[in-house]
Amino acid sequence: MTESKVLEEEVRQLALRLFGDSEEKRAGFEKRLLDMYTKSEKSQFLIIHNPGGWGNTRIENLLQWERSIIEGVDNTIRKMGYSGVLVQYFRSSTGWRAVFSDVREQSRYFNFKAEVMAEEMMLLTRHLNKLKILMIGISQGAAFSNAVLQRMDGEERIFSIEIGTPFYYKSKSVATDRSLTLNGNGLMPDALMEYNVPVILKTYFTAPVRWLKYRIQGKKIKFTYCINVPGHDYNWDYPEVRGKIEEFLRTKFGQKSDVEVGTK
């Protein structure tokens, strides 16, 4: 049996174990995992973005600061001399029905979804023995990345950058030598991390007013863009944000030598 057939069969068996009789879920899982494998097999890094919120926002629709982090990390890895591919990992589908169906899963620290992603990452590293995986999690995506990393104890080629983990997940998060946690942007405290209830409530209660104002003006703004919690903003241009991330990447991976860059 060829290597590709071995991989396909392993993916099929894993999908069957995780999703049982659900053909639709198995097919979606197999397609996503094989697609990540194909994109990664000639790269040294697989950079995975776990979006904030409900985890279904595409890069082009992200808030500017979240997009700046993804682009900043991707560019830094390349400047260090490594080849890499960037993908997004969506935790849920779009629409209110999908959101409500995920409430229980998110409240249980992403129990099943984290297990699924961990299984995917471990399969990739088994078949691609030179690949390093770097997760970038934002807000709820940061908590999700941490939940995934906890299920891969001992896996030395999978790393996590976790930015702005909400207070309601902090007690469940575990720091490791393969993770970087940013608790503030260096300019002002993050109210969502510091459990500043009055500020958080004010932000959420006034968000519908801002959203309605934009709609009246004819601007189709996503409701989540109107939830601007003070300090929950980690722009790549902020010195402390950029500095800590670049230091983490340099410490863990280092600069590829000119000889390696020329022969990769």
Image (spheres, helix red, strand yellow):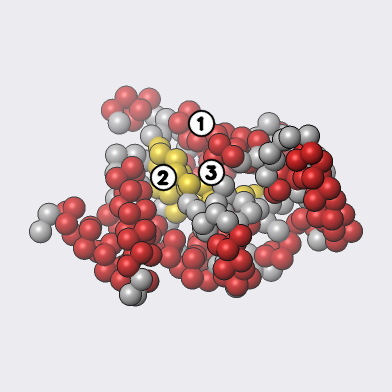
Q: Indicate which label's residue lies in the foreground, 2 or 3.
A: 3
Mark sitting earlier along the chain (2/3): 2
Vertical comparison of 245 with 193: above or below: above
**Does 253 sit left or right of 28 as displayed?**
right
Q: Residues within 10 Å of mark 2 (few under 14, many from 20)?
A: many
Q: Residue furthest left?
A: 1
Residue at screen point 76% across, 49% down: 227
* Residue 219 placement: quadrant: top right
**Closest to the observer, 188 or 49:** 49
Q: Secondary structure at mark 2?
A: strand
Q: Which residue is mark 3?
A: 58
Place of residue 20 in the rendered image (x, y in percent of width and height, measured from the top left) = 34, 75
Q: Secondary structure at mark 3?
A: loop
Q: As shown in the figure, which amino acid type bears the numbered disc 3?
A: Arg
Q: Residues within 10 Å of mark 1 (few under 14, many from 20)?
A: few
Q: Secondary structure at mark 1?
A: helix
Q: As shown in the figure, which amino acid type bears the numbered disc 2?
A: Leu
Vertical comparison of 160 with 17: above or below: above
Q: Indicate which label's residue lies in the foreground, 1 or 3.
A: 3
Label 2 to label 3, Cα distance in Å?
17 Å
Residue at screen point 18% across, 53% down: 4
Label 1 to label 3, Cα distance in Å?
19 Å
Place of residue 194 in the rendered image (x, y in percent of width and height, measured from the top left) = 80, 57
Q: Which residue is mark 1?
A: 75
Residues marked 1 and 2 touching at CB (< 8 Å): no
Q: Residues within 10 Å of mark 3 (few under 14, many from 20)?
A: few
Q: Which residue is mark 2?
A: 46
Residue at screen point 26% across, 64% down: 12
Q: How many marks?
A: 3
**Does 241 sit left or right of 91 as displayed?**
right
Place of residue 258 in the rendered image (x, y in percent of width and height, measured from the top left) = 38, 25
